[in-house]
Image (tube, grey):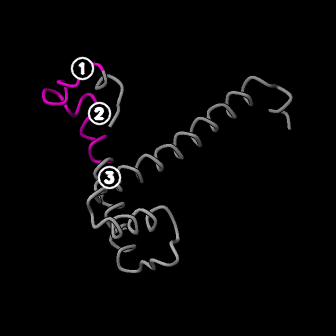
Amino acid sequence: MSGGILNFMPFLRYIIPKYIGYTELKEIHDTLYKFLRETIKEHRKTINVKNPRDVIDAFLIEMIELKDKAFTEEELQVVCLDLLEAGVETVSNTAVFLLLHVVRNEMIQKR
Protein backbone atom coordinates (compact mmCIF):
# COMPACT_ATOMS: atom_id res chain seq x y z
CA MET A 1 0.00 0.00 0.00
CA SER A 2 1.13 3.49 -0.63
CA GLY A 3 -0.34 6.69 0.59
CA GLY A 4 1.41 10.03 0.98
CA ILE A 5 2.54 10.65 4.52
CA LEU A 6 2.50 6.91 5.27
CA ASN A 7 5.47 6.51 2.97
CA PHE A 8 7.57 8.72 5.22
CA MET A 9 6.07 8.10 8.65
CA PRO A 10 4.48 4.63 8.64
CA PHE A 11 4.22 4.57 12.44
CA LEU A 12 1.36 7.09 12.21
CA ARG A 13 -0.97 4.32 11.06
CA TYR A 14 -0.94 3.04 14.64
CA ILE A 15 -1.46 6.45 16.23
CA ILE A 16 -3.95 8.30 14.01
CA PRO A 17 -5.09 5.90 11.26
CA LYS A 18 -8.35 7.71 10.44
CA TYR A 19 -6.79 11.15 10.12
CA ILE A 20 -4.06 10.20 7.67
CA GLY A 21 -6.26 8.08 5.43
CA TYR A 22 -4.85 4.73 6.51
CA THR A 23 -8.23 3.29 7.50
CA GLU A 24 -9.77 4.16 4.13
CA LEU A 25 -6.70 2.94 2.25
CA LYS A 26 -6.81 -0.36 4.16
CA GLU A 27 -10.51 -0.83 3.40
CA ILE A 28 -9.90 -0.27 -0.32
CA HIS A 29 -6.94 -2.63 -0.25
CA ASP A 30 -8.97 -5.32 1.55
CA THR A 31 -11.84 -4.94 -0.94
CA LEU A 32 -9.47 -5.40 -3.87
CA TYR A 33 -7.90 -8.49 -2.31
CA LYS A 34 -11.35 -9.96 -1.63
CA PHE A 35 -12.29 -9.40 -5.29
CA LEU A 36 -9.05 -11.03 -6.43
CA ARG A 37 -9.51 -14.04 -4.11
CA GLU A 38 -13.02 -14.58 -5.49
CA THR A 39 -11.81 -14.22 -9.07
CA ILE A 40 -8.98 -16.70 -8.52
CA LYS A 41 -11.38 -19.11 -6.81
CA GLU A 42 -13.71 -18.93 -9.83
CA HIS A 43 -10.77 -19.52 -12.18
CA ARG A 44 -9.73 -22.58 -10.17
CA LYS A 45 -13.23 -24.04 -10.62
CA THR A 46 -13.35 -23.44 -14.38
CA ILE A 47 -9.72 -23.82 -15.43
CA ASN A 48 -8.87 -25.64 -18.65
CA VAL A 49 -5.19 -26.57 -18.52
CA LYS A 50 -5.03 -26.96 -22.31
CA ASN A 51 -6.61 -23.57 -23.01
CA PRO A 52 -5.66 -20.78 -20.56
CA ARG A 53 -7.90 -17.72 -20.80
CA ASP A 54 -5.68 -15.14 -19.14
CA VAL A 55 -2.75 -14.49 -16.82
CA ILE A 56 -4.60 -15.98 -13.85
CA ASP A 57 -5.11 -19.27 -15.68
CA ALA A 58 -1.48 -19.28 -16.83
CA PHE A 59 -0.28 -18.70 -13.27
CA LEU A 60 -2.57 -21.39 -11.86
CA ILE A 61 -1.44 -23.88 -14.51
CA GLU A 62 2.16 -23.16 -13.59
CA MET A 63 1.29 -23.75 -9.93
CA ILE A 64 -0.34 -27.08 -10.82
CA GLU A 65 2.60 -28.22 -12.95
CA LEU A 66 5.15 -27.28 -10.30
CA LYS A 67 2.94 -28.69 -7.53
CA ASP A 68 2.73 -25.37 -5.65
CA LYS A 69 6.48 -25.33 -4.98
CA ALA A 70 7.41 -22.22 -6.93
CA PHE A 71 4.35 -19.98 -6.68
CA THR A 72 1.65 -19.30 -4.12
CA GLU A 73 -1.86 -17.95 -4.47
CA GLU A 74 -0.82 -14.92 -2.45
CA GLU A 75 1.86 -14.16 -5.06
CA LEU A 76 -0.80 -14.45 -7.76
CA GLN A 77 -2.95 -11.94 -5.87
CA VAL A 78 -0.01 -9.53 -5.68
CA VAL A 79 0.67 -9.89 -9.43
CA CYS A 80 -2.99 -9.24 -10.22
CA LEU A 81 -3.10 -6.24 -7.89
CA ASP A 82 0.04 -4.81 -9.52
CA LEU A 83 -1.53 -5.17 -12.98
CA LEU A 84 -4.80 -3.63 -11.81
CA GLU A 85 -3.11 -0.68 -10.11
CA ALA A 86 -0.85 -0.08 -13.12
CA GLY A 87 -3.89 0.12 -15.38
CA VAL A 88 -5.76 2.45 -13.04
CA GLU A 89 -2.75 4.74 -12.62
CA THR A 90 -2.23 4.97 -16.39
CA VAL A 91 -5.85 5.90 -17.06
CA SER A 92 -5.87 8.37 -14.17
CA ASN A 93 -2.70 10.13 -15.35
CA THR A 94 -4.00 10.29 -18.92
CA ALA A 95 -7.26 11.87 -17.75
CA VAL A 96 -5.41 14.46 -15.65
CA PHE A 97 -3.18 15.49 -18.55
CA LEU A 98 -6.17 15.62 -20.91
CA LEU A 99 -8.00 17.91 -18.50
CA LEU A 100 -4.89 20.07 -18.07
CA HIS A 101 -4.59 20.39 -21.86
CA VAL A 102 -8.24 21.43 -22.17
CA VAL A 103 -7.93 23.99 -19.36
CA ARG A 104 -4.79 25.54 -20.86
CA ASN A 105 -6.03 25.61 -24.47
CA GLU A 106 -8.81 28.10 -25.16
CA MET A 107 -9.45 26.81 -28.69
CA ILE A 108 -10.28 23.35 -27.38
CA GLN A 109 -12.63 24.84 -24.78
CA LYS A 110 -14.61 26.62 -27.50
CA ARG A 111 -15.17 23.36 -29.40
- Disc 1 is placed on an element classified as loop
Number of residues whose C-alpha sits closer than 10 Å to that of mark 2, classed few (under 14), some (14–19) or many (20 or more):
some
Residue at the image point whose x is 32% and y is 71% from the top? 41
- Disc 3 is placed on an element classified as helix
Residues at discs 1 and 3 in contact (Cβ within 8 Å)? no
- Numbered label attached to residue 21: 2
- Disc 2 is placed on an element classified as loop
Location of residue 56 in the rendering, given as x and y in whole percent from the top left corner: 43, 63
Q: Which sits in the foreground, 79 or 65?
A: 65
CA distance for labels 1 and 2: 13 Å
Q: Which sits in the foreground, 41 or 93?
A: 41
* Amino acid tagged 3: Glu
Question: Which quadrant of the rendered structure holds the N terminus?
Answer: top left
- In the rendered structure, which disc, 1 or 3, sits on the residue that comes first in sequence? 1
Residue marked by disc 3: 75
Residue marked by disc 1: 9
Location of residue 71 in the rendering, given as x and y in whole percent from the top left corner: 31, 56
CA distance for labels 2 and 3: 26 Å
- Numbered label attached to residue 101: none
Which residue, as the protein is rendered here, is positioned at the far left?
A: 15
| Part of the protein shown in magenta | 8-28
Asked where in the image residue 72 lies, by quadrant, the reply is bottom left
Number of residues whose C-alpha sits closer than 10 Å to that of mark 3, classed few (under 14), some (14–19) or many (20 or more):
few
Relative side of 65 to 108, left or right: left
Q: Which sits in the foreground, 68 or 13?
A: 68
Relative side of 65 to 20, left or right: right
- In the rendered structure, which disc, 2 or 3, sits on the residue that comes first in sequence? 2
- Asked if 24 appears above or below 57 in the picture, the reply is above
Residue at the image point whose x is 64% and y is 37% from the top? 94
Residue at the image point whose x is 79% and y is 25% from the top? 105
* Amino acid tagged 2: Gly
Q: Which tag is nearer the camera, tag 1 or tag 3?
A: 3
